Image (spheres, rainbow, N blue to C red):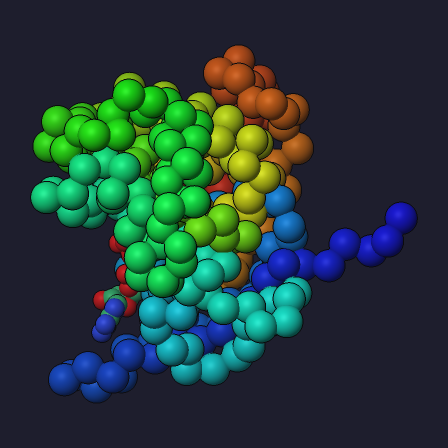
Amino acid sequence: MAERKPLLSIRNVKKIFKTRDGELEALGDVSFDVYPGEFVSIVGPSGCGKTTLLKILAGLLLKSGGAIEVDQANFDPAREVGFVFQKALLLYWRKILDNVLLPVEILKMDRAPMKERARDLLKLVGLQGFEQSYPKELSGGMQQRVSIARALIHDPKLLLMDEPFGALDAITRERMNLELLRIWEEAKKTILFVTHGINEAVFLSDRIIVLSARPSRMVQALDINLPRPRTLEVRTLPEFGQYALQIYNSLEIR
Ligand SMILES: Nc1ncnc2c1ncn2[C@@H]1O[C@H](COP(=O)(O)OP(=O)(O)OP(=O)(O)O)[C@@H](O)[C@H]1O
């Protein structure tokens, strides 16, 4: 079998912010790989630089050191990366279909053929029939599903998700976890997912990267060998608890 090549190689990435009070070292030295089709989560203490790392990967921030290698010539983050933030950040004056089509306009792609894709994606995220609604007519969970459809519209290889369900109530969050796995399996994307939820990370991921407090470095890369497709029963397996405990230990939560 041919050796798998990572889609993304993050090598000794550092980020130092220059602030009024001097330099702030956010990312100390972070290295890990993400393989095509993987679901990788990042967990770590508040302020350790998880959002910073995602922004660097999306091309929204410059790194201060290290290297990011991508297994593709001319990998353009604008085209190959989709970003889902904690808040859905929909444009309230645009209908749902037009919100999903926003990246198409930003990337100056042909809008007409993408309309059909936008409809298909809304169906994929369970929002068929809401194409002509406005964001305020949708619940928080529904709005977040629109933002997932929007992040997928230009068919990026990599989906970066920054605590996408952090603002949702616990029940909606559970539902969104199941939805996301279904979407991931269907859309066959590579996902890098930031969360504060250790159980959420274990439930969703193939691998979990645990970062230390600032200046952060990787303290653990944990492969999650739980069966897929994951159903809620997976949470009752003893291994599930053992994985969660390993992460608590790495984070020194006792
Ligand atoms: N633009 C900036 N200028 C200066 N400092 C910044 C900037 N952005 C982030 N920081 C600092 O860098 C550190 C990492 O921030 P970041 O938002 O990446 O952390 P995080 O791990 O995502 O946190 P949380 O889990 O609380 O969301 C923090 O100490 C933050 O104050």
Farthest-out residue, front: 112
- Of 45 and 38, which appears nearest the observer? 38
Residue located farthest toward the right when viewing the structure as drawn: 1
Residue at the spot x=50%, y=59% of the render?
A: 80
In this view, 195 is above or below 237: below
In the rendered image, is residue 161 in sight?
A: no
Residue 175: percent from left, percent from top: 36, 21
In this rendering, position of residue 78 left or right of residue 234: left
Q: Tell me residue 36's x, y (percent).
A: 64, 50
The residue located at (23%, 36%) in the rendering is 96
Q: Is residue 85 above or below residue 235?
A: below
Q: Position of residue 27 (x, y in %)?
A: 40, 70
- Image quadrant of residue 206? top right
Q: Residue at x 48, y 31 (%)?
A: 183
Residue 232 x/y as whole percent: 49, 16
Along the line of sight, which residue is nearer the eye, 35 or 182?
182
Where is residue 164, by image quadrant? top left
Location of residue 200 by image quarter: top left
Q: Quadrant of ligand 1?
A: bottom left
The answer to which of 2 and 126 lies nearer the viewer is: 126
Nearer to me, 64 or 21: 64
Up-down: is 172 above or below 44?
above
- Asked if residue 128 shows in the view, the reply is yes
Number of marks: 0
Q: Is 21 displayed left or right of 234 in the figure?
A: left
| 90 relative to 253 in the view: left or right | left
In the rendered image, which quarter contains the C terminus?
top left
